Image (spheres, helix red, strand yellow):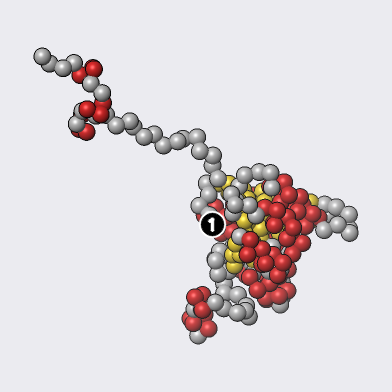
Amino acid sequence: METDRRDTPPEAYPRSMTVEPETVPPTDAPRRTTYVLVDGENIDATLGGSILGARPAPEERPRWERVLEFGRTAWGGDDVVGLFFLDASSGSMPMSFVQALVAIGFKPIPLSGAPHEKVVDIGIQRTLAALVGRQGDVLLASHDGDFTPQMRDLLTPDRHVGILAFREFASSTLQQLAASGLDVFDLEGDVGAFNVVLPRLRIIPLAEFDPLRYL
């Protein structure tokens, strides 16, 4: 008498006769965003005053599109949001530069305030504080230690946090956060943000030493 296969448990069939359930990858996974906040005045002042000793020429300034792209790829995220803070307390702003920022994907944030207010610092501090309650990774382009409390608050196990700076000029209080997980990226060496070799005098990690730069 032939056995009715409808009454046979699946484990009784040979493996070739069983149907494995199809594995469908999840499609509703949230996208990962990296927020890139740029303290443009601080970067410009450090570049001109501490490295070049003069106002940077156009070819000596950072390629901000590379900074934005680095933010997109640094930790393997999906999206990047670039916020470029400007002091517009004078009532005007450099429109050609602002339009160039928009063209490469940044959101310019021109702020104004009273003469005694450091409007860019305050704007960045408020934005960093707002990001504490929002998912996403954070990169801050600045050397300023005034942002240390807000950056410390962002350092949680589920978030990447870093600074973009000339490493030798980054505030010691910011660099001390590396022990808590802060990543420190060099604008020239790690990001490749410049078309020219900058005349920097700094301690060079042996792994980064390129003798061709000095020959």
Asked if residue 86 shows in the view, the reply is: no
Image position, residue 22 (x, y; %): 34, 32
Asked if residue 142 shows in the view, the reply is: yes
Which quarter of the rendering shows the N terminus?
Answer: top left
The quarter of the picture where residue 70 lies is bottom right
Task: From the viewer's side, name the closer residue of 54 and 188.
Answer: 188
Question: What amino acid type is highlighted by mark number 1?
Answer: Ala
Image position, residue 61 (x, y; %): 64, 66
Q: Secondary structure at mark 1?
A: loop
Crowdedness of circle 1 by 10 Å Cα count: few (<14), some, many (20+)?
some
Q: Is residue 60 above or below residue 22?
A: below
- Residue at 69%, 44% (x, y): give it: 133
Where is mark 1, residue-wise? 74
Outermost residue toward the front in this view: 1
Q: Is residue 171 above or below residue 199?
A: above
Outermost residue toward the bottom in this view: 215
- Residue at 75%, 53% (x, y): give it: 125
Position of residue 21 in the picture relative to residue 200 (left or right): left
The quarter of the picture where residue 18 lies is top left
- Residue at 53%, 57% (x, y): give it: 74
- Residue at 62%, 56% (x, y): give it: 161
Position of residue 135 in the picture relative to residue 215 (left or right): right
Outermost residue toward the top in this view: 1
Q: Is residue 97 above or below residue 49?
A: above
Image position, residue 100 (x, y; %): 64, 54
Q: Is residue 200 above or below residue 82?
A: below
Image position, residue 105 (x, y; %): 60, 49
